[in-house]
Image (spheres, rainbow, N blue to C red):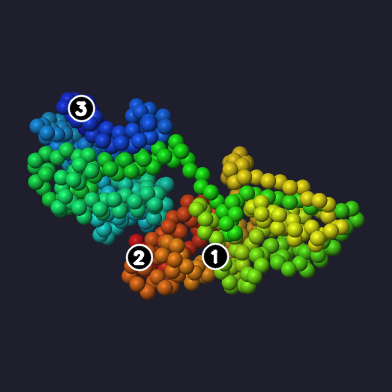
Amino acid sequence: MPSSDSRSGLMKWLRREPWSSAFGELLERHLGPACDKAGVPLEELSEVIGDHWAMTLWGCAFEDFLTREVEGVGNIVDDYLKRRGWNETAMNRAYMTALRSSVISLYEASDIRPGESFLARDLIRGGEPVRVSERTATRTLKPWDRIAARMVEVRGKTTLGGGVLPFEHELSESLIAALGRILARAPGELADLVADLGIELSPEESASVIDEAEMLRLAAPMVSTYWLNDTLERVLSPAVPKVYNSDGEEMEIFALHYRLEEGVAAEELRAALDAAPGLDPASATFWNWLAPGNDPGTRVEPKARDGLTFTSTMAQGAVVLGTLELKNRTLTLQVNSEPRAGRGRALLDPLLEGLVSAPLIERQTLEQAMAEHRTRGSAPVSSGLPPDEERRLIHAQLDAHYRQQLDAPIPALGNISPRNAAKTAKGREKIASWLKLIENRAARQGPGDPMGDYDLTWMWQELGVADLRK
């Protein structure tokens, strides 16, 4: 990003009329629609989203203003350089001139070199990725992150402008689609287009042909509005989606604690559990309770519900209904719904009659469990294994999981398997987007997390899409 010195003169010049009034109108176009929709006064925006993001949005509007003509007086960069350019370094003059002709776009980051640079692929205009020199943002960017920003080229080096907005994948896809519709309409519906964007064009601007770059220049307030609408909605009305298990039951955390009766040896309990159908012993003290009829290698589709579905499976694909652990003469059944707790008790009570006492039942909603997790902190629970061994085991499980997914229907691919999707050009593009999303989410794990450093290169190669990994 540029230093504040490179734009400080322009910022001071902005306080003068007519620039100050004209900028105030443009700032309202960037921030006003989202603030009005959310019922947040513009002057209170920083209290809601924080000073950092409020200043970032101001920066987006400021850089947009640098590219615009004010009726009757011209452009602020031209005016400033004419009157005060002698007071700026050659590099600052070149940077201001580059900002003058810049446009905001949506970019995808890859090949990130922290403290140095990253590759930016323009998701609106296409083309080959560009190497961007950047120190600050590269320390937090993750592979395949998406950002709205201005790329500024000065003396053969490309840098970021000051206004950079992070876009989640779903929001970015929505923005890409909206900008695509605008561009498709532009040649024949200029009047309706500018009305939709809330733009007042000069006669000279109206006479120009709107191409991708011109559309992005005019639509800069729309980018801010998309981002701010989403941010205000998440801050003011955080969504708590319904979460269901594979049986379509709303998830809650249940733990049933069975205490061994006096005189009962742990070996008696193990023998009863090992002999029970549906209980798969993983060790001398741990059992997985598997769904009936789940033959190894058979994939069971979760029941569809309006919300998120969580399914726990063994490496072979069998659905895990719950787990049993024997510790300190207490057997604990843990499941993720009230109906499963009832079914689990119906399974265990006759099986363990005379061996254990009636269970003590603990119940937590997901919200309560998450609040407890935040209170305890987010440090991962140690498996007790050496880090290298733990990583090896986790990576082996991920290998098995993703091997299975190669032949399983994937919603993001139109409910067809990756191998089938790879047979068409459009399918391969969808596979690349799907793999990027997986890698991006993994990269967001904490430092040293085995999930975060799992290498998916083999999937790109096996599916024949390695050339799209850019």
First of labels 1, 2 by sequence position: 1
Q: Which residue is mark 1?
A: 301
Circle 3 is placed at which residue position? 21
Where is residue 181 shown, x and y percent of the image? 25, 53
Q: Is residue 139 visible?
A: yes
Q: Position of residue 33 (x, y in %)?
A: 30, 36
What amino acid type is highlighted by mark number 2? Glu
Q: Residue at x 41, y 39 (%)?
A: 233
- Looking at the rendered image, the disc whose residue lies closer to the viewer, 3 or 1, is 1
Tell me if mark 2 has few (under 14), some (14-19) or many (20+) residues whose alpha carbon lies within 10 angstroms of its own. Answer: some
- How far separated are the C-alphas under marks 3 and 1? 59 Å
In this view, the mark in front (1 or 2): 1
Q: Amino acid at mark 3?
A: Ser
The x, y position of residue 163, in whole percent, is 31, 40
> What's the amino acid at mark 1?
Glu
Quick check: 297 left or right of 131? right
Closer to the camera in the image, 216 or 10:
216
The mark found on residue 429 in the picture is 2
**What separation in Å lies between label 1 and label 2 (alpha carbons)?**
25 Å
